[in-house]
Amino acid sequence: MSFRFIGGFWFIGKRNKLISKMSETPGRPMKYPYTFSAKIAQFPLKFYFQNQWIWRYWLAGGIVLSLPVIYKINKLANSPENVALWAERRRKEAEAHHH
């Protein structure tokens, strides 16, 4: 069986079975993760979820507190008076552009 290394890949035997050096998992993590994906992979997300209060209550508290505000803005933006006001503004703007 012959081994050949060409362009970052190992070729084995007559069938040219391809084995990538990059696909091998490292034995230990890098001392400093240089790439963005390595930084994400080594980030201790589980530790932060378990030990910081803001991660636990961010989603539930954010939804509970923001839904009434979003509902009120939606009611005001879609009121018949506001719809008529914006229709009039768009009509005037269209007239100005068409001379």
Image (spheres, rainbow, N blue to C red):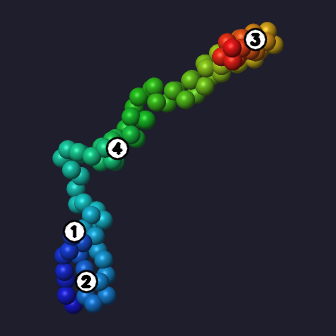
- Give percent across and percent down for residue 83: 77, 15
Foreground: 73 or 27? 73
Q: Position of residue 4 (x, y in %)?
A: 19, 80
- Residue with the most extreme right position: 80
> Which is in the foreground here, disc 1 or disc 3?
3
Dot 1 falls on a residue whose secondary structure is loop
- State which tag comes first along the sequence, 1 or 3: 1
**Mark 1 vs mark 3, CA separation in Å:** 66 Å
Identify the element where label 4 is drawn. Answer: helix
* Residue 91 numbered tag: none
Distance (Cα) linking label 2 and label 1: 13 Å
Amino acid bearing label 2: Ile
Q: Which residue is mark 4?
A: 40
Q: Quadrant of residue 23?
A: bottom left
Q: Residue at x 29, y 74 (%)?
A: 19
75 on left or right of 66: right
**Sequence-first disc among 4 and 1:** 1
Give the residue type that dot 1 points to.
Gly
Question: What residue is shown at x 69% (from left), y 18% (from top)?
Answer: 98
Left or right? Give the position of 27 relative to 55.
left
Q: Which residue is mark 2?
A: 12
Residue 17, position in %: x, y? 31, 81
Q: What residue did someone put label 3 on?
A: 88
Say what amino acid the circle numbered 4 marks.
Answer: Ile
